[in-house]
Image (cartoon, rainbow, N blue to C red):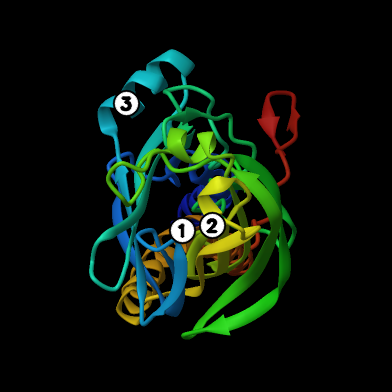
Amino acid sequence: MRRRASLVLLAFAVFFAALAPLLRWYAYPRLAKIPPSEYQTAVMEASPATLLDYGTMKPRTVPKVSIVQTLRGNVPAAKEVGKATGRDVVVWDTLSYVAGPDGKMVSKIPERYVFDAHSQDPVHAGGEHVDGDAVRRDGIEYKWPFLTEKRDYRYFDAQTRTSAPIHYKGTRNFRGLEVYYFEQTIPWTKVPLPKTMPVDGVTPETVRKAGTTRWYSTKRMFWVEPTTGAPVNGQEIHKEELRGGTLLGDRDRVTVFSGHVKMREDYIRHTVDMVKSQRQLVLLLTAYLPWGFLILGLALLALALLLEARGRAARPPSAPSAPAALSVAGRSV
């Protein structure tokens, strides 16, 4: 019975030891992915801020500017792109809506971001765009990969329609989470005018005809939880200007918007709570189950060897065989 039990334990030990690396290196890359129906809203504020009054074409200080960022997963588009590419694809339709202190629209920029559900690498299909302009993203946007590394990444900037390095600046503690802190600085760059302007009668075409151009610079900061790759906090020191042309009169440049944009406190708390729960699911596949199964397999192996050793020690020694009888002339001697 002991021998049979030790063989059963040995079989289970081999099973769990083999299952451990399969979970980490086979199941995890296939199971950990962004759901195609994701929906998120975040509100960021700059208090105070400088904002251009298009009526007088003069900048003024306002108590607050709000940026509402909505992210909606487009499931039908994801299925269509997935069939065409043979990959698990997520399509995010996003909208960044900037409102002044009176709630009126300052600007709104829609985007479509198409990426691989597992790796977060961009997928160049499905009509990716920024404010209606077709783009070809290089690098990440909005979210870092699962198991984020301590290194620089390429991050897409929607204003310039280009990607640039976002630099890893160290590990920090944020609201009880260990996070990686990243920074990206975009120097003053000429950027397209928004398709939708905040004043009736003023269009990108009228501004361009006046010889006026839009320029932009920002310092972007993210606190990223590395297991999920989700930013739990984000800030920008954001600046926009109009430069040159007859629209500004005798001025070379005028501030359109300037402010230190920060995520609103209630959205920070909500994001941290959500990431803490999702983090456990990723750790289940990458650490808890693989290591648990490996330790269980080793324990079962040790128990199987112990039972086998005890079984051999308790087994009585075999009795010596009786010598064969000699036969002489048909008689036994």
Q: In the rendered image, which quarter is residue 325 located in?
A: top right
* Amino acid, disc 3: Ala
The residue most toward the front is: 250
* Amino acid, disc 1: Val
Q: CA distance from mark 2 to mark 3?
A: 30 Å
Q: Secondary structure at mark 2?
A: helix
* In the depicted structure, whether residue 322 falls above or below residue 133: below
Q: CA distance from mark 1 to mark 2?
A: 6 Å
The residue most toward the top is: 84
Res. 96 visible in picture: yes
Crowd tier of the residue under label 3, counting other residues whose Cα lies within 10 Å: few below 14, some 14–19, many 20 or above: some
Q: CA distance from mark 3 to mark 1?
A: 26 Å
- Please name which of the two marks, 2 or 3, marks the residue nearer to the observer: 3
Asked if marks 2 and 3 touch (Cβ < 8 Å), the reply is no
Instruction: Name the residue tied to disc 1.
Output: 282
* Amino acid, disc 2: Thr
Which labelled disc corresponds to residue 77? 3
Asked if marks 3 and 1 touch (Cβ < 8 Å), the reply is no
Which labelled disc corresponds to residue 286? 2
Q: Nearer the viewer, residue 304 or 325?
A: 304
* In the depicted structure, whether residue 112 falls above or below residue 69: above
* In the depicted structure, whether residue 268 falls above or below residue 76: below
Which labelled disc corresponds to residue 124? none
- Please name which of the two marks, 3 or 1, marks the residue nearer to the observer: 3
Where is residue 177? Give x, y as percent: 51, 79
